[in-house]
Image (tube, rainbow, N blue to C red):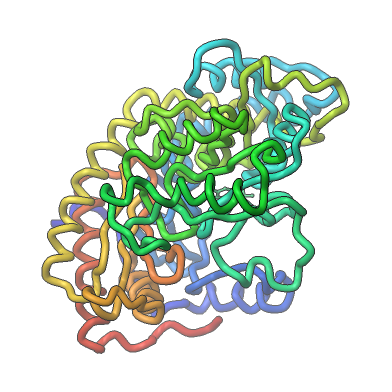
Amino acid sequence: MATKPYPRIVTPLPGPKARTILELDRRFVSPSYTRSYPMVAVRGRGMAVEDPDGNVFLDFAAGIAVCATGHCHPEVVKAIREASGELIHMSGTDFYYPAQTDLAQKLSEIVPGKGEKKVFFTNSGTEAIEAALKLARHATGRSGFVAFYGAFHGRSFGSLSLTASKATQRRGFFPMLPGAVHAPYGNCYRCAINLEYPGCDVACVKFIEDEIFGKTLPPEDCAAVVVEPIQGEGGYVVPPESWLPRLRELCTRHGILLVADEVQSGMGRTGKMLAIEHTGVVPDVVCLAKGIASGLPLGAMVAPAALMNWKSGAHASTFGGNPVACRAALATISLLEGSLVSNARERGEYLLGRLRTMALSHRSIGDVRGRGLMIGVEIVKDKSTRERAPEARDRIVERAFEKGLLVLGSGKNTVRLCPPLVLDQDDCDVALSILEETISEVESGSALGATSGR
Ligand SMILES: Cc1ncc(COP(=O)(O)O)c(C=O)c1O
């Protein structure tokens, strides 16, 4: 089946050279990072990443859903080389340059909604969310926010106040931003209200109206509802069809802004440029980052021109919208529009179909869900009780690494597949076969923890 020179594992993992780097990391790098296995990368091309010992991995993690065009796509590398030979930094806060205006124009075309839009540039997802929160307060004169259980919006204080995917991300950091409240996400596999869709009539949106707006946060004090169209770090959860339209209707009725956090789900990953396009909903504000520049640090907050009417000095960033990152983004978008968004859709359908079939013969696969190349495989102890199996999930992720496949966990017990959008049929088949082998081994108890060195 495999016709590629990867994956190829030639040493025990981690290999001797990788161990040296892991030791330096242990001594000098913040222990707050969340590494789940000892993968040390030195170079990447397309779907493959090589470690210092010559082991080559098939990458279904894409640097946490970032390397949309694969590793070091020649067009992106060319754009970065050319741009960095022309102008590395100028600061859009105080000066003008064409890379930024070109990208702003392109993003305002990509983001749904009629009429002129404006773009605020950042270096990361969390900064894009911070910008959205500030704009929402500024534009509405209100201070409250609604976000969702399971959400991940970032780790700076505003976005962290909306983040609710793991207590460890918030422990020790209180107080959060006042006025940020959480509601149940449209997660039908684990309905917080114990109802079934569609008979529930989307009771989780009604919960916001009745319980939150009715009892704790009056809607006139709510500036924005901030939502991931597909929940990322919370477990790759796809809400039911009418959930986002109902949320949109609720926001419109109360004059509340709907902010779509497309940091993980955007830039073609789901088979459309933005995940929200699958729902027909037009949000007021869209936040982008991760895949936007194929790995260069860049984020963006996009809103209608009429909304983004704050005055000079209200918000700015020294590095946000750096010229090299903007050129990388323009090259990335051109590749996405060329063929990668449709590739994501087609390969994603294939992967989802095969994984759903796989679930029929594996007792630990509780749920398979996703759109395009944003796919979650939820690992459970028992399909009927849906009891979570976080240890088994961790073993699957670790064992896949040992076999040369890079995947990440998401949520408490979900394996996430978020490969670069350049993958082909072979890549899909190799990943599926490693994953199935791994799941079988973990189910039978034969997958012993071999990886060490962390
Ligand atoms: C949906 C979403 N929003 C925001 C962020 C924060 O992005 P960053 O890590 O670039 O600050 C993330 C990161 O995982 C994310 O998945």
Q: Quadrant of residue 46?
A: top left
Q: Nearer the viewer, residue 107 or 182?
A: 182
Please give the name of the residue rendered at 16% of the width and 55% of the height, measured from the top-left corner: 354
Q: Taking 412 as reference, is 267 above or below it?
A: above
Eyeballing the image, is 418 above or below 316? below
Residue at figure coordinates x 61%, y 17% from the top left: 117
The reply to whether residue 159 is visible in this rendering is yes
Nearest the viewer among 371 and 46 is: 371
Assign the N terminus to one quadrant of the image. Answer: bottom left
Q: Position of residue 182 (x, y in %)?
A: 59, 55
Q: Residue at the top extreme? A: 115
Q: Residue at x 79, y 34 (%)?
A: 317
Please tell me how many numbered marks the rendered image carries: 0
Residue 148 spot, x, y in % from top left: 54, 53
Residue 44 in view in this figure? no
Q: Is residue 331 above or below residue 287?
A: above
In the rendered image, the vertical position of residue 324 relative to residue 13, given as above or below: above
Q: Quadrant of the C terminus?
A: bottom right
